[in-house]
Image (spheres, grey):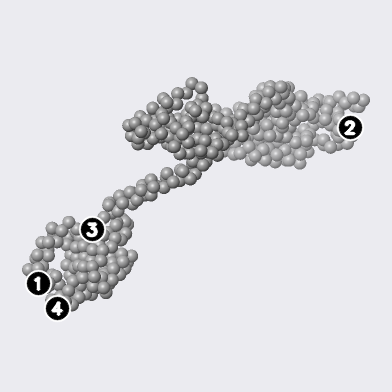
Amino acid sequence: MSTANLAGSPTMQLDAAALGRLLPYAAWVKDISLRYRWINRHWATLLDLSEQRIVGHNDAECFPPWLSVLMTRDDCAVLARAQAKQIEIMVQLQDGRQRMWRIQRQPLFDAEGNLDGLAGFVTDITDDWQVRCELKTISLRESNWWKALKSHALLATMNQNGHYTYVSEQLCQLVGRPATTLLGQGHATLGWIAEGVDFNYLLALAAQGKPASFEFSGTTGNGTRFWAHSLVISLGSSDGDNQRFVEVVSDQGEGRNVALKLAATNTQLTRTVNENVELIARLDHLTRTDTLTGLFNRRSFQERAAQERTRSTRLKQPIALLVLDIDHFRQINDQHGHAAGDQVLVQLAEICRSTCRAVDVLARIAGEKFALLLPDTNLSAAEVITERLRSTLAERAVPIPEQQPVQFTVSIGLTSWLAEETFSAALARADQALAQAKADGRNRVVSG
């Protein structure tokens, strides 16, 4: 009975079922219309479908589209040529897994020799395929690494005595010598070994499978000094003439030159700093303070304010912030001159210093505008302090050479710096209170 009768004879159906259970791989039979006549349990397992769901159906009804197209295409190729065919394809199953299948297709003929269908045998070779890919990658890498090193690396090979048997062009360029003057020579004969370094000991270490690392230096043919780092690795056995070594060299010259220049620069910088400590300290002071009054400038005030904000938040303490502005300061400059105006600013700074606590932060943040930060001070306590400061300034007269003493007043805006807001927001609110104090007639304190 021909293979084509697998679906027609009960006896052959029983034989095929028994055979299918014994096969270690998936198998199936399709008719000329590419509908499944018979499958074994391995094929049902691969497809995650029941036998009833597959037999009598074609691939388009059993597979996702991307797989049914591949299966149908190859089935048609076997039927068209009436020849067996084996392929390996990567398939993606409905659960998202990718598997590599090897499929062997065999055309089937009836008793008269007419094409009647085809049989297929499928083996999941994913694991083997992954191993082959890894071996191929390793093989390519191992076949190319030596060629790449010889073409691009500072590389040499040595015999059991440490004498060069091969030197790359790049290494010749580093040491400034042609290969002909290096072959047959070793580090010791070339004078490249630092004093106290036993090169034979290093070779012995490498021969035992312990890569030897060391630094060496020498002089090129034109008298230029070079510095390099060497790594010696053993190849082959350690028996007599079979011992070989590979030396991989890295150029340390650029790094050494940079290090020497950097050290010289650091030495000069240190000397300069030591010679100008007082000047540097004064420059730092000038960048952080107002030159006329000696108070913090705006930048330093913000930095100190941030520090106090952190401390106060940690200790859960309040902070008050005030800004004050000299009333009618332009008139003082116009009537008494700018020198008198500067004296007023200096006097105001002195009075504020003497009135404030050591923990308070005082700054001149604009022309005649000053700011004061009061740590650990709530708004009611700050109002008392601020009012005392305003009245003290209003009572004080500033002596001016060859002129009548100048009296002045200030307007003050006061606020509490809330824990959840930025410094800029608190300062803006204090500025609004200051503007209100001026609008209300000046020489007063307004809380905002």
Q: CA distance from mark 4 to mark 3?
A: 31 Å
Is any atom of residue 326 visible in this view?
A: yes
Task: Please tell me the numbered disc located at residue 112.
Answer: 4
Foreground residue, 58 or 295?
58
From this view, report whether residue 74 is shown above or below residue 213.
below
Between marks 1 and 3, how big is the CA–CA gap? 27 Å
> Mark 1 = which residue?
1
Q: Nearer the viewer, mark 2 or mark 4?
A: 4
Between discs 4 and 1, the one toward the N terminus: 1
Identify the disc placed on residue 336.
2
Q: Secondary structure at mark 3?
A: strand
Foreground mark, 4 or 3, reads 4
Amino acid on which the number 2 mark rests in the picture: His
The amino acid pointed to by label 3 is Thr
Q: Please tell me the numbered disc located at residue 123.
A: 3
Do tag 4 and tag 3 residues touch (Cβ < 8 Å)? no
> Quick one: which residue is furthest to the left in this view?
11
Q: Earlier in the sequence, mark 4 or mark 3?
A: 4
Give the image location of residue 180, x and y in percent.
51, 38
